[in-house]
Image (spheres, rainbow, N blue to C red):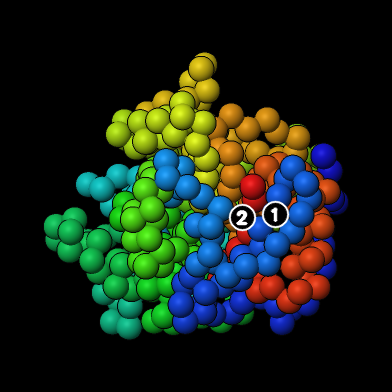
Amino acid sequence: MKLSRFKYKYPEELVAKYPLEHRDESRLMVVHRDTGKIEHRIFKEILDYFEEGDVFVFNNSKVFPARLYGNKERTGAIIEVFLLRELNAESKLWDVLVEPARKIRIGNKLFFGDNEELVAEVIDNTTSRGRTLRFLFDGPHDEFKKLLYSLGHTPIPRYLGREAEPIDEIRYQSLLAKIEGSTSPSTASLHFSRELLKKMEVLGIQKAEITLHIGPGGYRPVEVEDLTKHKTESEEFFIEPEQAEIINTAIKARKKVCAVGTSVVKALESSVTTDKLVKPCKSTWSSKFIFPPYNFQIPTCMVANFYQPETTLMMAAAAFCGMDLLEKAYQTAIKEKYRLFCYGDAMLIL
């Protein structure tokens, strides 16, 4: 499969810059893989396609305020620091991305906050934009984390063309998010409201939660034409035994297993046993890159958003849907003026 298959043009006005007032009132395109049929529904109607014993699998990773703005020592140049993960709590070491990277060298100090409440020193280069920072803070780790996050901003994607606002603190986050570690939410899960989750419970439709900490790589376009040569970033995930059991019970009963988003697909497909069940796991890292053609072992259906061109997110959806049918779905979405990308409308691929 070539990268060029994942290029498509879209009107800029279809990019959803803000979320809808109600999570579950986005539009829902239902795509039937067996017939190629496409239906147009409202997201709150998604449960019409499920019955007692089916299971939705959610990613419960929580987005943290990963984007900071600081000033370089002496020059005062404004530097953006994008926090990726904490490497060592005791030493306050963080893996980050910096912009503009050409100005940031080992030994530089960066100052954060109007009164320079926090200082960091660059101690290593990791990639062209990647750096390791040591934050200089003498107090307890809890106080450091509180200060760091108070200076941070919700890391909404740049394609929205705006800075983060208070609404993003609430809506760029799934209602099920609870374990901190992501720089992006599972956008497919943003459509589930409290009312919809309660209705699932009443109908006997199961809910399982896995954790995969999503990095920023999903929003970056792939840059190699031959997809077999692309290396996707590793992401940490874990699956608790009781959650694996919920999924495996549904598999054994031949019920639907619906992966809510590409991050869930990645975690499930990275933890398959020889008898095609889900294996519980503690902290594990997966660099699995799913693109067509791919033989899925666990999910039988999938909730997805309409993703950016040439991204690994779109490729995972295409692997599940089938490339030709996904192209048809995206063309239909643009024709019918669906809202696109992270705050946009959704697909249910059956």
Based on the displayed image, in which of its 4 quarters is residue 210 positioned? top left
- Quadrant of the image containing the N terminus: top right
Question: For the residue labelled by badge 2, is the local secondary structure a helix, a strand or a loop?
Answer: strand
In this rendering, the answer to whether 286 lies above or below 20 is above
Between the residue at mark 2 and the residue at mark 1, the CA separation in whole angstroms equals 6 Å
Q: Residues within 10 Å of mark 2 (few under 14, many from 20)?
A: many
Find numbered disc 1 in the image and state the secondary structure of the residue it sits on. Answer: strand
Check disc 1: other Cα within 10 Å, few if <14, some if 14-19, many if 20+: many
Under mark 1, the amino acid is Val
The residue under the point 74% across, 42% down is 34
Q: Looking at the rendered structure, which numbered label has been put on residue 136? A: none
The spot of residue 257 in percent (x, y) is 51, 40
Apparent side of residue 287 relative to residue 149 in the rendered image (left or right) = right
Residue under the point 66% across and 58% down: 30
Whole-percent x, y for residue 105 in the image: 51, 57
Residue 94 in the figure: left or right of residue 350: left
The answer to which of 236 and 101 lies nearer the viewer is: 236
Q: Which residue is mark 1?
A: 31
Q: Looking at this view, is 174 or 246 the one in front?
A: 246
Residue reaching furthest to the left: 140
* Residue 334 x, y percent position in the rendering: 77, 71
Rendered location of residue 184, percent (x, y): 48, 59
Q: Which disc, if any, is residue 348?
A: 2
User: Could you tell which of marks 2 and 1 lies nearer the N-terminus?
Assistant: 1
Pointer 2 with pointer 1, Cβ within 8 A: yes
Res 132 seen here: no
Disc 2 marks which amino acid? Answer: Leu
Above or below residue 117? Residue 275 is above
Q: Is residue 137 visible?
A: yes
Q: Residue at x 71, y 50 (%)?
A: 32
Q: How many marks?
A: 2
Q: Residue at x 70, y 62 (%)?
A: 39
